[in-house]
Image (tube, helix red, strand yellow):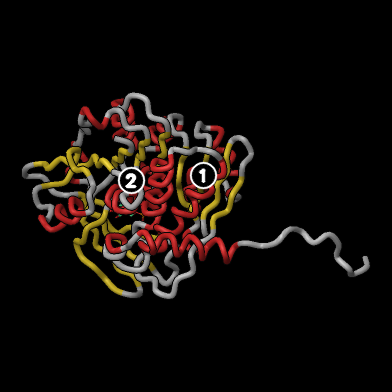
């Protein structure tokens, strides 16, 4: 029982310049699970209504994700999110967020999940993130994510959960909004002063940056793609590769955390190729390995040249 995730399981309606889908499987915990699941066993804690389509249950179960912690609320309506992207896919525009069953959700962690060593608090009400964390016994690593919706509506609760995290993931606009700082370095320093020992700022198609309280800094590139259809879930897929790989390897050294960032970047690259979970559910180990080698090849460069021959 290594990896536990709590977050949203949703029905998403999304429009991008490349297509449109209605009421398809989404949610922060869903994307995370379907990504992390390529590395390790994932135990999912969330809630859906009894309107949640059977085919989506089957998809989650067939992926091998443990759903003992996925509650079905009788008579309840599943969380729904709708949004769109302009030609700049880095910025999601939320149209509607219907919390529905999450409004009254009280997460109950199955006994066998309480010993989870790795915990991912996916984007959800920070009060719910705290409720989950309070039930877990002695995790080795707690990683969390959030978004503008909670920064605007639950800032106090968000700051309280930040104190409990080892690693926080958020995107550049959220970091700027949360810290009221334009410089991402200044924002990262501020966030580190609030509790986490590592902050990872995702910059959409421009990669992701890591800063740690020990001064470690790393920049992960994105995998260059020809086919991009829908960036929804890219952040959660990144988190899935990142935490899933760390949970599987059990190695939290700086070098391995850098490697985990690359796995994160790779999983995000698969996600954006298609809508919903369509691409993520169809990848194989070889696909991941191939992208890892390619990223290593295109970002490698040689040592500093001893001298520059041009005279000053
Ligand atoms: P991402 O693109 O990685 O930031 O995450 C997209 C997913 O987050 C979508 O599938 C949504 O269902 C989900 N989502 C959107 N808003 C919220 C919210 N306020 N709380 C929890 N999940 C959300």
Tally of numbered tags: 2
- Look at the numbered disc 2 and give the secondary structure of its residue: loop
Where does the image place residue 144, in percent across and percent down from the top left? 40, 40
1 and 2 marks in contact (CB < 8 Å): no
Residue density around tag 2, few if under 14, some if 14–19, many if 20 or more, within 10 Å: many
Q: Tell me, yes or no, if residue 191 can be seen here.
A: no
| The residue positioned farthest toward the left in the image shown | 75
Q: Give the residue at x 22% y 41%.
A: 46
Residue 195 versus residue 15 in the image, above or below: above
Which quadrant of the rendered structure holds the C terminus? bottom right
Q: Tell me, yes or no, if residue 209 can be seen here.
A: yes
Where does the image place residue 129, in percent across and percent down from the top left? 32, 35
In this figure, which residue is indicated by the disc labeled 2? Answer: 40
Residue 169 versus residue 162 in the image, above or below: below
- Look at the numbered disc 1 and give the secondary structure of its residue: helix
In this figure, which residue is indicated by the disc labeled 1? Answer: 257
Q: Is residue 168 left or right of residue 83?
A: right
Q: Give the residue at x 46% y 41%.
A: 168
Where does the image place residue 169, in percent across and percent down from the top left? 45, 45
Q: Is residue 123 left or right of residue 301?
A: left
Please tell me which residue lies in front, 135 or 241: 241
Q: Give the residue at x 36% y 59%.
A: 285
């Amino acid at each position: 029982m290594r990896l536990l995730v709590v977050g949203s399981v949703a029905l998403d309606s999304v429009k991008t310049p490349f297509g449109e889908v209605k009421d398809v499987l989404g949610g922060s915990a869903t994307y995370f699970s379907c990504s992390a699941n390529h590395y390790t066993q994932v135990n999912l804690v969330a809630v859906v209504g009894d309107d949640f389509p059977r085919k989506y249950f089957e998809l989650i179960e067939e992926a091998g994700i443990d759903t003992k912690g996925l509650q079905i609320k009788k008579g309840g309506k599943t969380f729904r999110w709708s949004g769109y992207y302009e030609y700049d896919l880095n910025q999601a525009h939320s149209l509607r967020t219907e919390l529905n069953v999450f409004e009254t959700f009280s997460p109950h962690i199955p006994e066998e999940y309480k010993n989870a060593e790795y915990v991912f608090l996916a984007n959800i009400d920070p009060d719910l993130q705290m409720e989950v964390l309070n039930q877990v016994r002695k995790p080795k690593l707690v990683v969390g994510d959030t978004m503008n919706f909670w920064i605007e509506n639950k800032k106090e609760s968000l700051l309280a959960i930040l104190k409990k995290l080892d690693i926080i993931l958020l995107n550049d606009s959220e970091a700027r909004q949360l810290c009221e700082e334009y410089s991402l370095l200044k924002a990262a320093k501020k966030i580190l002063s609030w509790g986490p020992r590592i902050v990872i700022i995702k910059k959409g198609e421009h990669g992701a940056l890591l800063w740690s309280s020990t001064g470690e800094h790393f920049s992960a590139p994105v995998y260059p793609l020809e086919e991009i259809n829908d960036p929804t879930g890219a952040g959660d897929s990144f988190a899935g590769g990142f935490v899933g790989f760390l949970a599987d390897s059990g190695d939290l050294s700086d070098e391995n955390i850098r490697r985990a960032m690359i796995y994160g970047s790779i999983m995000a690259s698969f996600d954006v190729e298609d809508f919903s979970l369509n691409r993520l559910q169809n990848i194989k180990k070889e696909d991941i390995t191939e992208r890892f080698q390619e990223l290593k090849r295109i970002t490698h460069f040689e040592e500093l040249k001893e001298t520059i021959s041009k005279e000053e």
